[in-house]
Image (tube, rainbow, N blue to C red):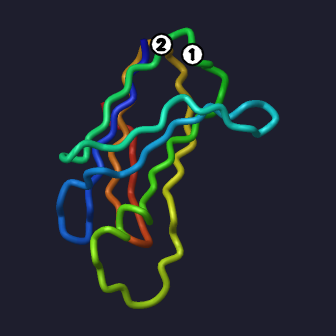
Amino acid sequence: MATLTTHTLNSVDGTHAGQVGVSLARVAPDGSRVLVFSKHTDAGGRLSERIDSAQVDTAADYELVFQTAAYFATRGLVLQGLRIQNEVVVRFRMPDPDAAYHMPLVMAPNGFSVWLSS
């Protein structure tokens, strides 16, 4: 069983980003997406989902999508200039159907940083 986890952080005020919408989709060979899950981070900005090994296609791409614009819309920020980033999309593979994949996200209204951590 694979485990996918994340920890979302708000870089504007340095807090944990709770209630961020997060979805995972498998990208089919024709480019269509098959939804694996759609959840929200908890109050501490964390999300942990177990994915049955039989559902993990080690040759497929996956997209982890964070709904950042919806989150920042609830923060009451006064933004100068345009807000052009609606979501953060991380495309990756899961070569081991039994591994743990942890991808923390530090986000701002128009920027982000994400990495694979163990």
- Along the horizontal axis of the image, is 60 left or right of 76? right
Please tell me whether residue 99 is drawn above or below residue 16 in the rendered image: above
Whole-percent x and y of residue 50?
A: 39, 20
Residue 49: which quarter of the image?
Answer: top left
Residue sitting at 68 percent across and 37 percent down? 33
User: Residue at position x 32%, y 57% from top?
Assistant: 106
Rendered location of residue 65, percent (x, y): 50, 47
Dot 1 surroundings within 10 Å: few (below 14), some, or many (20 or more)? Answer: few
In the rendered image of this protein, does residue 59 appear above or below residue 103? above
For disc 1, the marked residue is 55
> In the image, residue 55 lies at what x, y percent?
57, 15
User: Image point 74% across, 38% down: which residue?
Assistant: 32
The residue tagged 2 is: 52
Q: Are marks 2 and 1 in contact (CB under 8 Å)?
A: yes
Q: Amino acid at mark 1?
A: Gln
Real-space CA distance between mark 2 and mark 1, rounded to the nearest whole angstrom: 5 Å
Q: Is residue 95 above or below residue 26?
A: above
What's the amino acid at mark 2? Asp
Residue 112 vs residue 64, the one in the foreground:
64
